[in-house]
Amino acid sequence: MPQQASRAIAPAQGKLGVMLVGLGAVSTTFIAGVENVRRGSAQPIGSLSQLATIRLGKRTDKRAPKIKDFVPLADLQDLVFAAWDPIPDDAYTAARKAGVLEPQHLEPIADFLKGIRPLPAAFDQNYVKRLQGTNVKRAKTKRELAEQLREDIRRFKQTAGVDRVVIVWCASTEVFITPGPAHQTLTAFEKAMEQNDPAIAPSMLYAWAALMENVPFANGAPNLCVDIPALMKLAEDRQVAIGGKDFKTGQTMMKTVLAPAFKARMLGLAGWYSTNILGNRDGEVLDDPESFKTKEESKLGVLEYILQPESYPELYGNVFHKVRINYYPPRGDNKEGWDNIDIFGWLGYPMQIKVDFLCRDSILAAPIVLDLALFFDLAQRAGLAGVQEWLSFYFKSPQTAPGLYPEHDLFIQQTKLKNTLRWLMGEEQITHLGVEYYEYGAH
Ligand SMILES: NC(=O)c1ccc[n+]([C@@H]2O[C@H](COP(=O)([O-])OP(=O)(O)OC[C@H]3O[C@@H](n4cnc5c(N)ncnc54)[C@H](O)[C@@H]3O)[C@@H](O)[C@H]2O)c1
């Protein structure tokens, strides 16, 4: 039986437009994957929204529906896609160039993919040094560019006949920017857009445009983007769901599994050296030191928060943490991430762990894009405005309310996600206390 009133959630009626900023490896792998799943030729592996179950009530109740049968999510058949990209390739050509999916997943849906042509992007090479784009918007000011993006959203809604839209940033990582005066208030932000202030990156224009159109916005890259006070306030004022940053896929996902295990067992950490080789366009962009700096900050943060060196100086007070990304074209999207972890145990005796993850970046990221699109749409229909911290599960540097430290432990994040779904639907929270199953718990 529900323990509390469930939250009013508008039904997932009609079509959901998924607008992607960037039509590169991640976006095309996501779109082609969804289309294959819709046609019954593949499984949505890696997607919680499609495959995971959620336990409700007591263990003895044996209630564990699939998440998609428990909360009112948009159906995959109702998704319609659009994208912006400065490179004019349609989704088929972009997917072929990205080289992630094999012909068996692209050729049968070639016509569908060719029908997705990128809208001209709000792009500025100063923010992504290694790219050149021809399919770009022109305007005198950044504000005008952002207004053109708003127009794109409105037109897509009309022409594609979609009832709701969500936007996911799947575009390149921009150069490192620290929050400054232009990011503090909406007035300062809008004035800075009008004055073409360099503090306003293209990703911020998309975020602003989304919010002004009441469209939820999720940021899959580590750029500041929507993680600035001006846009967080705008999201709250306009009651729109936002979140980020940086999809948590390969090496960092492993880090946020292993580090909590060391801490749980009170094992010490002397150093963690992480290195990667990858050869896709993302790797090429990250070969630029300024874009890499943005990524580095995002990847480095997790250990500090998980290990809490201030509480455990004898275990984590002197950790050497290094992250490198090396562009190595022969590997394409099939990244290799190595971790050398120096831990120590009882009486300080050293031990080592080596992780060699031969992963596929976009294969890990695509289901995250799907889940984010569906859960952000759910959040919006449930009236959850502002930062969606319950979706931290999907991000390397989760956005939080001001003053809150982010939660990085993958399993705490998973609990938070599932408990939020229970809360939305008026179901009891699961604490894992479990005394009710024993004699002593009955009193
Ligand atoms: N794949 C993963 O595991 C993973 C994990 C975390 C984050 N990410 C991030 O996701 C993003 C996409 O990764 P990818 O492998 O698809 O990269 P990609 O280079 O294949 O695609 C990115 C696309 O964005 C386009 N783009 C750049 N600036 C743009 C702008 N202003 N507007 C519209 N489009 C723009 C580029 O032309 C390119 O086609 C990157 O920022 C990457 O760091 C990926």
Image (spheres, rainbow, N blue to C red):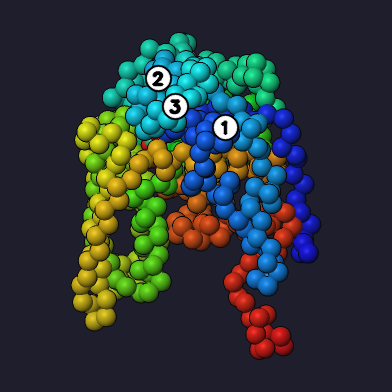
In the displayed structure image, the side of residue 42 where residue 215 appears, left or right? right
Q: Tag 1: residue type?
A: Arg
Image marks 1 and 3: residues in contact by CB distance under 8 Å = no
Quadrant hosting ligand 1: top left
Question: What residue do we see at 32% from left, 36% from top?
Answer: 333
The image position of residue 158, as x and y in percent, is: 67, 17
Quarter of the image for residue 290 reads top left
> Which numbered circle lies on residue 39?
1
Quarter of the rendering occupied by the C terminus: bottom right
**SS for dot 1:** loop
**SS for dot 2:** helix
Q: CA distance from mark 2 to mark 3?
A: 10 Å
Q: Quickly name the residue at label 3.
A: 106
> Which numbered circle lies on residue 218?
none
Camera-near label (2 vs 3) is 3
N-terminal label among 2 and 3: 2
**Is 208 above or below relative to 156?**
below
> Which numbered circle lies on residue 93?
2
Q: CA distance from mark 1 to mark 3?
A: 12 Å
N-terminal label among 1 and 3: 1
